[in-house]
């Protein structure tokens, strides 16, 4: 007996929500229209009443997980706004590991994505950055966010394993041949450094540097 569901029970929202659930659990490479239909208990062809193809589905998924960031009129300090944006984006990428590639891999023009981008550009423009510097700054910050998450998600050790791993590898990096790696390992072993990377440390460096560039750019305009 074929599976059936009335058209008023299947919606684009249900399809997208289920697709996100599958991608979150198994990776977007394991998302297929057949698996999606099976999970929704419908015939695969019924999905195409709501989506054009898998690429169209992924575009809708991307727009569904685009984070909501503070509005311009809620922000009094551009650096604070960008810190909040970075934290929100990082949480989004942790919840949806597949999303980072999709955010940058295609021309995503859904309403949520357009709002997100326009607000991001607005943070910089309202602070006084030129469009050129805005573009550089925005992409620098996003490269850091994506890179930090990629590294943390794929690092082979858990923080609880850092000390034992340092003890294990210490004989392979003797002080005589690898003094700085040896010293770093000792700092983790003796507890003076926990080995855990601080997301806000790197973000702060970027924002402070951008603040200096902004001050320089404003001075040059007055000359």
Image (cartoon, rainbow, N blue to C red):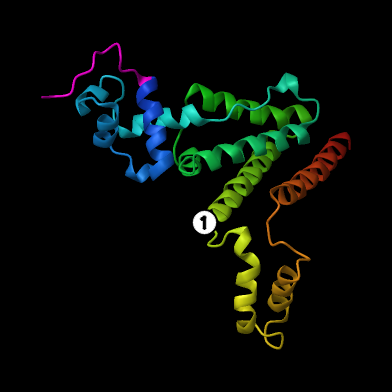
Q: Quadrant of residue 208?
A: top right
Q: Is residue 69 toward the left or the right of residue 130 in the image?
A: left
Name the quadrant of the N terminus.
top left
Name the quadrant of the C terminus.
top right
Q: Position of residue 30 (x, y in %)?
A: 33, 44
Q: Which residue is mark 1?
A: 154
Farthest top residue? 8
Q: Position of residue 37 (x, y in %)?
A: 26, 30
Give me the residue at 50% from left, 30% from top. 65
Front in this rendered view, residue 129 or 63:
63
Give me the residue at 37% from left, 32% from top. 19
Q: Is residue 98 toward the left or the right of residue 94 in the image?
A: left
Q: Inspect this view and state whether residue 25 appears.
A: yes
Q: Is residue 143 shown above or below 106?
A: below
Q: Position of residue 172 (x, y in %)?
A: 60, 83
Give me the residue at 56% from left, 37% from top. 92
Q: Quadrant of residue 121?
A: top right
Q: Is residue 73 shown above or below 93?
A: above
Give me the residue at 59% from left, 29% from top. 117
Asked if residue 115 is among those painted magenta in the image, a careful observer would answer no
Front in this rendered view, residue 199 or 170:
170
| Count of numbered marks | 1
Per the image, label 1 sits on a secondary structure element best described as: helix
Front in this rendered view, residue 15 or 217:
15
Judge the density around disc 1: few (<14), some (14-19), many (≥20) Cα neighbours within 10 Å. few
Magenta residues: mostly which secondary structure?
A: loop
Q: Which residues are magenta?
A: 1-12
């Amino acid at each position: 007996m074929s599976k059936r569901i009335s058209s008023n029970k299947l919606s684009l929202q249900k399809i997208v929500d289920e697709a996100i659930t599958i991608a979150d659990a198994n990776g977007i490479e394991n998302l297929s229209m057949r698996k999606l239909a099976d999970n929704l208990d419908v015939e695969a062809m019924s999905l195409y009443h709501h989506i054009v193809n898998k690429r169209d589905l992924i575009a809708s998924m991307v727009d569904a997980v685009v984070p909501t960031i503070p509005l311009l009129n809620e922000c009094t300090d551009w650096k604070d706004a960008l810190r909040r944006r970075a934290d929100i984006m990082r949480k989004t990428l942790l919840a949806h590991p597949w999303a980072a590639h999709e955010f940058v891999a295609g021309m995503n023009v859904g309403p949520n994505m357009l709002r997100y981008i326009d607000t991001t550009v607005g943070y910089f423009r309202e602070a006084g950055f030129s469009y050129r510097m805005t573009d550089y700054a925005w992409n620098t910050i996003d490269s850091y966010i994506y890179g930090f998450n990629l590294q943390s998600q794929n690092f082979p050790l858990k923080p609880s394993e850092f000390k034992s791993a340092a003890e294990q590898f210490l004989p392979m990096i003797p002080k005589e041949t690898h003094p700085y790696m040896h010293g770093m390992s000792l700092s983790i072993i003796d507890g003076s450094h926990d080995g855990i990377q601080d997301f806000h440390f790197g973000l702060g460096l970027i924002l402070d540097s951008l603040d200096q560039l902004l001050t320089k750019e404003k001075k040059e305009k007055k000359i």
